[in-house]
Amino acid sequence: MNTFDIGFAEIESYLRRSGWRRSLSGPLAEIWQAVDNDSVKVFVPTNSEAPDFWRTLQSLTAELARRENRPQSTIALEISRQFLDVTDLRAEDSEISDGTIPLVAGIGLFNSAHRMMVSAAAATLHRQSYYGNSMPRAAHKHARRMRLGQTRPGSYIVPVISNARFGDLVDDTFNEPRLEASADESYFERRMLTTLSAALQALSEMAVTRDRIPSKLDVRSAVDEGLSSELCSAVLDVIGKGGVDTFDVTFNWAPSSAPPRDLTGKVEFTGESAEIIQQIEVELKETDAPAERVLYGVIRRLSLKKNETRGHVALDTVIDGKPRVVTFELPLDVYSRAARYHGERRPVVVRGILDATPGRRATMTVKAFDADRSVASFDDLA
């Protein structure tokens, strides 16, 4: 993440969110003025291929830094990550100093980053307490898209960088809402991180904040949030094998899009919680529960006949990279929410046992249904 990652889209996004508006456009540059003072203007380069783009960008960030009274490097960094989610994995220990970390702890931190993202990708596709040899190949494929940023000194921090440049999910050109399959793929990394945040939060509540050993029901409920034995193992790579006193994960959501709803921004684990997490890891391996498929999409059709106690839903979704329509039933209280989401053209997420036999209509026995909180818009949060 440096100025070489900056294009006009990043600059435009930053300026709009910082109180600026466009006043004059040209083929290679634009003039923007402060919303609260028309006399304050900045010169904005628009073509990153132009010979003077980087020199003009330096002048722009210098002017913004002067106006905002912040370092120029901070302004450039914020502009560069307008369309990036950055997940910071931080190790804190008395033996970490001067930007260095013990070898074993460092290996554990980097291993944790990889295993954490793979397990989050798997749980975004299938909720399962223990994957073992059944880890979806797609989970490794999606995790490979993530990038590692440069470590930062002091407390040892490894930034994991992922895409947050999204397409429009819903195609409104038809009478019935349709899912834009190519745009749906662009949201996968954000959904991964949403799953990861919820799962880590559930693990922290069981292992750190509670004053009792979690029950089997507690552990099973955490699987619904995306927790797995593999994710526990990823945390233990740092506070267990790595011997680090404190390990925390901070989610820095891209400024260009609203953060997922109802999630904490930071989850922390201490070395003292390692023993409980090890117990949870074993419990998850021994849990005998069927894997549940997770589908994201938009509701295409709804139907409810007189005197029926369950409504019928047809979901436009993507299964194994191919557009599909999946039908299922919902009890009336949940169906009423589905009707509202349908009217709002709001993306939804559904979890349950899927039957998608080739050549037959795809159906699902639903265990959970709600709005897709990973794709909230700024309007949703108003």
Image (cartoon, rainbow, N blue to C red):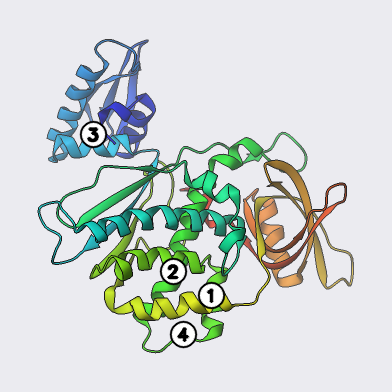
Q: Which residue is mark 4?
A: 214
Rendered location of residue 223, percent (x, y): 55, 71
| Amino acid identity at mark 1 | Leu
Rendered location of residue 186, percent (x, y): 54, 40
Q: Is residue 240 left or right of residue 359?
A: left
Whichever of labels 2 and 1 marks the residue nearer the N terminus, that label is 2
- Given this view, does label 4 or label 3 mark the residue nearer the observer? 4
| Amino acid identity at mark 3 | Ala
Mark sitting on residue 76 = 3
Q: Secondary structure at mark 4?
A: loop
Whichever of labels 4 and 3 marks the residue nearer the N terminus, that label is 3
Residue 108, image quadrant? bottom left
Q: Which residue is mark 1?
A: 284
* Residue 257 seen from this side: yes
Mark sitting on residue 232 = 2
- Given this view, does label 3 or label 2 mark the residue nearer the observer? 2
